[in-house]
Amino acid sequence: MKSPAYPANEQQRLLRLQRLALLDTEAEAVLDGFTQLAATVTGMPIALISLIDKDRQWWKSAVGLPQGSGTARDLSFCGHAIASEEDLFEVEDARLDERFADNPIVLGQPRVVHYAGVPLLMPGGERIGTLCVIDAKPGRLEAQSREILGNIARSVVNVLLLRESERTQRERALTEAKFKLIAEALPQMVWSTSPEGQPDYFNQRWYEFTGMHPGQVGDEALVSMLHPDDRARAWAAWQHSLASGQPYETEYRLRHFTGDYRWVLVRALSVCDEQGVILRWMGSCTDIQDQKLAQEELRVASHRKDEFLAMLAHELRNPLAPLSTAAQLLQIAPNDAERVRRSAELMERQVRHMTELVDDLLDVSRVTRGLVHVDRDVVELQQVVQGALEQANPLIEARHHTVEVDLPETLVYVRGDRVRLVQVVSNLLNNAAKYTAPGGRIGLRLSHAEGSACLSVTDNGSGIDPQLLRHVFELFTQGQRTPDRAQGGLGLGLSLVKSLVELHGGRVQASSAGLGCGSIFSVFLPSIDAQPQAETHSTGLALAPGSQALKMVVVDDNVDAGQMLAVWLRELGHQVVVKTAPEDALASPELDQVDVYLLDIGLPQMDGYELARRLRAQPRNEGAFFMAVTGYGQARDIALSKQAGFDHHFVKPLDTARLLAVLDHIVARA
């Protein structure tokens, strides 16, 4: 039995070490003190604390071991042999114990003969290491030494628990600091809640967006920021995520510090421990107001486009119905002169209407693509007003409107394209007439001040809904149509007005007090002080058609179109030959001494441009006039026809009055 010579105050030393453990003292120093105390109270030359961390690596705090004597793993050879995790395990002479017969450290350095070890147990019973003492001579500990060694082992566990708690707290604080550092650097609003969903943190972006005072993180403060219409839906989704642990994602309107509500995308994920227990919720709010507005704009634009296409189909079918009926009447009674006359007038009106629709479409297309060229002549706006009134007068008279015109006594001039400016004002007058009930009033006023001219068209019609007002000059936008569909048209006029005015360096403006309160459309143009130059007018001859027969050739692969044009020209007294293929026009021997060629452009095998060049190269066509009669009417098409040698370019449906004037001029020159 060993009788160690340890001092009487070993209990005081143990208490002092326990107090040091509670202070901010290095854990290694405290553990070294415990090993020294264990060696002293047992009289053993070597004392050792060996620990296993989470990665199953060993760490030692030892006294009495010479340098290079081995590792903690080597000196813990007997840990597996401890029969009871609560008792001290002691081997008096390892040389005589068959369990350690093959262990090299029994015979080597340090020489382990007498061994006593106490397991280090966590409160839950988990063994985390061993406190042991070693001697190179056989022996046995006294009961008091065994008791003190057990007390030291429990004190070591307490130190380790305290240091583990401090380490966990430090790691948690560091993690929290890193999280807040990242959260404050993000452009989104970042927040977190307890596992139960109670908010406990918002970053600075949140307070900047909402205008809330820093530190306001309660449920009531958060809910009050949501739009009333979104609260129930957002809260239900949040409760579902809290109950299920599933990610939270929704969109709602959040009150901005300005007082307006803005759409935000809200997402949150649960943060769980290794066992899957939710520790907290981390979330973010992203301002998506601009995306929402863009989506709504696209939705509205798509809806307007669909409505426009439906209206286009309707407006094109309307004239087709009477055209079809008139054609059938002509077949039934071809010899009834009165019926033929009425049918012809009807067909002419409907074709004119369809032409206007197509012209509007082409105008808008050309303007939006920047293909429209406007002249920069000196234009008197009073003349523009008169020209616009003449164009809009048929619709105004048909709806029995009263028009009040207010013009200044002083002439007002701008630099621009007279035809296009007349189109602008007539479109505004037609728009007012369409959306004003029969018998209504329309006003047209021209004013001038400080280098700016203003043309305003007012009406007491249906007015404009505030939601529509900011879109009224956009493509595919129309006001509500009345059941009688008196408005007609495709709703392209105002878009064309805006584009043409801007090409003249001006701007347009629309205002209305609301539905049923009428509207005001104003055009602002930069005015000039220059006086207009004297206009020169062509004195082209306008001889009666048919005074001299012309020999003409029509080339069109559309048989009906070519034959109908030939019939009309023959009625005027001209000689007309129709060809449907370019090769026939080039090779036919009867086509000699032709005065006029009327060529389609979209021909098979060879387009009209190439056909015109080849015909002009033939000696027999010297002095012949070439006219393009085509559906292609863009500026580029007209330029190509000039390059190919055409004298005139006509767009289908044919402007017969213009063609008659050209033919009269040719006859006069003959």
Image (spheres, grey):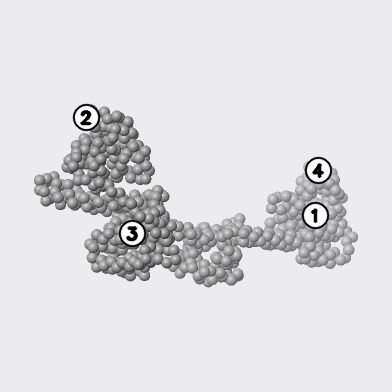
Q: Earlier in the sequence, mark 4 or mark 1?
A: 1
Q: Earlier in the sequence, mark 1 or mark 3?
A: 1
Q: Secondary structure at mark 3?
A: helix
In this view, the mark in front (4 or 1): 1
Q: Amino acid at mark 2?
A: Glu
Could one spot residue 31 in this view of the protein?
no
Q: Could you tell whether 74 is left or right of 288 in the image? A: right
Residue under label 4, please give it. 104
Assess whether mark 3 and mark 4 are in contact (beta carbons under 8 angstroms).
no
Q: Amino acid at mark 4?
A: Pro
Mark 4 neighbour class, 10 Å CA radius: few under 14, some 14 to 19, many 20 or more: few
Q: Give the camera-side residue of 3 and 233.
A: 233
Q: Residue at x 34, y 37 (%)?
A: 645
Whether 131 is drawn above or below 11: the answer is: above
- CA gap between label 2 and label 3 equals 50 Å
Residue under label 2, please give it. 590
Q: Give the camera-side residue of 258 and 50.
A: 258
- CA gap between label 4 and label 3 equals 117 Å
Q: Which mark is residue 61?
A: 1
Q: Give the camera-side residue of 94 and 375.
A: 375
On the image, which quarter does residue 417 sit in? bottom left
Whether 200 is drawn above or below 583: the answer is: below
Q: Amino acid at mark 1?
A: Ser
Q: Earlier in the sequence, mark 1 or mark 2?
A: 1
Q: Which mark is residue 163?
A: none
Q: Earlier in the sequence, mark 4 or mark 3?
A: 4
